[in-house]
Amino acid sequence: MKLGLAALVCFSSLVWLSECAPPTCYSRALDLSKEIMTLLDKIHTYHRTKTCAEILPTIFLDVHNSCITTKLRDILYVVLNHPSQYCRKRPRMVLLKRKIQNLHTIITRICYQDLVFFTDDCGAIDTGNTSPYYAEDRLQLLQEDR
């Protein structure tokens, strides 16, 4: 009896600590884009891959931007065709390639119907300067009217 009660308490605590809902396409795309940005930052700062990063373009991934598919395809082309064989075989570069391929597949094939693009500002992916969404513009106008 005590063993059964202990097993029940242990099981209920594991269920409580685990995430209740499985990741959605949207949440996976968001997480993967953050992972790619973090990995790119590490590649740009790590002494062994700093020379490899010189050829990589600077990007700011936003899954709400419709230009993300073309930018992912462009950076994937650069990573796959890096002029240095040494750089192509670096573990972080290989991991970057896999993550970009996964995100591109998720956005274009798996979650194609689930994602909503709020903007098509391709310059925002290159520079990181995003124009505010229409809803934010409208909110600002309403606050200024008061």
Image (cartoon, rainbow, N blue to C red):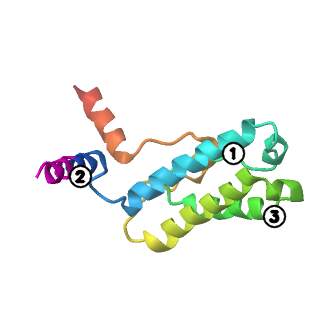
Q: Please tell me whether residue 6 belongs to the stretch shown in magenta.
A: yes
> Where is residue 50 drawn, in percent x and y?
80, 40
What residue is disc 3 on? 81
What residue is disc 1 on? 58
Q: Amino acid at mark 1?
A: Thr
Q: Are marks 2 and 3 in contact (CB under 8 Å)?
A: no
Q: Earlier in the sequence, mark 2 or mark 3?
A: 2
- 10 Å neighbourhood of mark 2: few (<14), some, or many (≥20)? few
State whether residue 69 is above or below residue 43: below
Observer-nearest of 51 and 108: 51
Outermost residue toward the bottom?
Answer: 109
Q: Earlier in the sequence, mark 1 or mark 3?
A: 1
Q: CA distance from mark 1 to mark 2?
A: 46 Å
Q: Main secondary structure of the magenta part?
A: helix
Q: Earlier in the sequence, mark 1 or mark 2?
A: 2
Disc 2 versus disc 3: nearer the observer: 2
**For residue 86, what is the image quadrant?**
bottom right
Q: Please tell me whether residue 50 belongs to the stretch shown in magenta.
A: no
Query: Which SS class for mark 3?
Result: loop
Disc 1 versus disc 2: nearer the observer: 2
Observer-nearest of 14 and 124: 14
State whether residue 23 is above or below residue 126: below
Range covered by the magenta-colored residues: 1-9
Q: CA distance from mark 2 to mark 3?
A: 49 Å
Q: Amino acid at mark 3?
A: Asn
> Where is residue 58 drawn, in percent x and y?
69, 45
Horizontal side of 4 relative to 63 (left or right) equals left
Q: Amino acid at mark 2?
A: Phe
What residue is disc 2 on? 11
Q: CA distance from mark 1 to mark 3?
A: 17 Å
Query: Which SS class for mark 1?
Result: loop
Observer-nearest of 143 and 125: 125
